[in-house]
Image: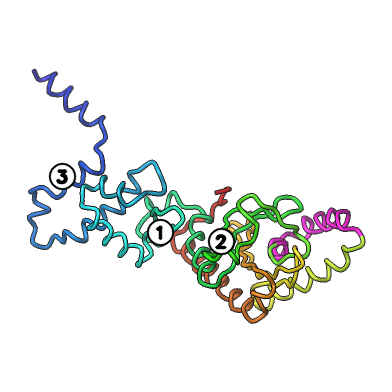
Amino acid sequence: MTDHAETGSFAEMQTPKSPRDIARERFEAGHVAQDRHFVKALARGLMILETFANSDVVWMHVSEIAEMVGLPKPTVVRFLRSLEHLGHLYYSSNRRQYRLGAPVLTLGFAARLPFTLGEMLRPELQHLADTYNVHASLAKRDRLDALEMVVCHSASTLMTLKLDVGSRLPLAGTATGTALLAHLPEKERDFIYHKLRERHGDNWNRLLERINAGFNEVEDRGFVTAYRSWATDINGVSVPIRSLDGASTYALTCGAPAALLPPEKQHLLGYKLLEIKRRIEGLTQRNGRAIDDPGVA
């Protein structure tokens, strides 16, 4: 009989409880719930955040979250809106789903663990895209191209450039490319210049002048602008951002048709991108964690 009881206990330990079961246990009579200092609304909000940690998926619908925590959907919606307003959750209007937001990183190591640079930056870039009607992205150098790793389109279809994750831009002559070249070691940059000279032929000297002017912008202001580059009617502004170990350089970029992204707006967005860069770098430094490669997402 003892063996049977021990076996049953072991089996229970091997079967993970669902978030819904955990939620029900926490709200049933017990020493925590009976504590007059226990704030049920706060507990419910935190349990909603926990559903993402206990789920195998990144994005979740309201109905899925309500099912997992065992709460009515209207109640869950109110909590989700509050958590979104605080930045702890991010809502995608295209997906109609929620995911954890970057500020959750400040809550502890367990929350920080799944985040990469791309995941941390996506809500920030999407906010820029929607607020200023531009294309916002994170790119990394791949040989002689800039490779789009994270892409956020403006809510206005008129502003959407024909770029998506995996799209490539030329290094020479674009704001993104100049930002990616800005912090390269001299030997590596010389090698890339040699290859770019072969690619662009007679146009290389003109492009090199533009690149050097961009380096001066990065030195003076922290960001680089490009006018009617890449495609003849596209303006852009970009900020280089490096991993804490210095192993990789990325570019935060905003772009739009030239008529819709004049110089004054480029400069405004340049400083906005710098603010994002400083927040992300400050966050990772406070948490003692290096920036990860974002991967293609």
Left or right: residue 79 versus residue 199 is left
The furthest residue to the bottom: 264
Q: Amino acid at mark 2?
A: His
Q: Which residue is mark 3?
A: 25
Does the magenta stretch mainly form a helix, a strand or a loop? helix
Secondary element type, mark 3? helix
Residue 296: percent from left, percent from top: 58, 48
The answer to whether the residues at label 1 and label 3 have Cβ atoms under 8 Å apart is no
Magenta span includes 194? yes
Q: Is residue 248 above or below residue 22?
A: below
Looking at the image, is mark 1 or mark 3 nearer the viewer? 1
Residue 74: percent from left, percent from top: 24, 57
Q: Which residue is mark 2?
A: 153
Q: Please provide the residue range marked out in magenta.
A: 177-201
Left or right: residue 289 versus residue 55 is right
Q: Which residue is mark 1?
A: 91
Residue 182: percent from left, percent from top: 71, 65
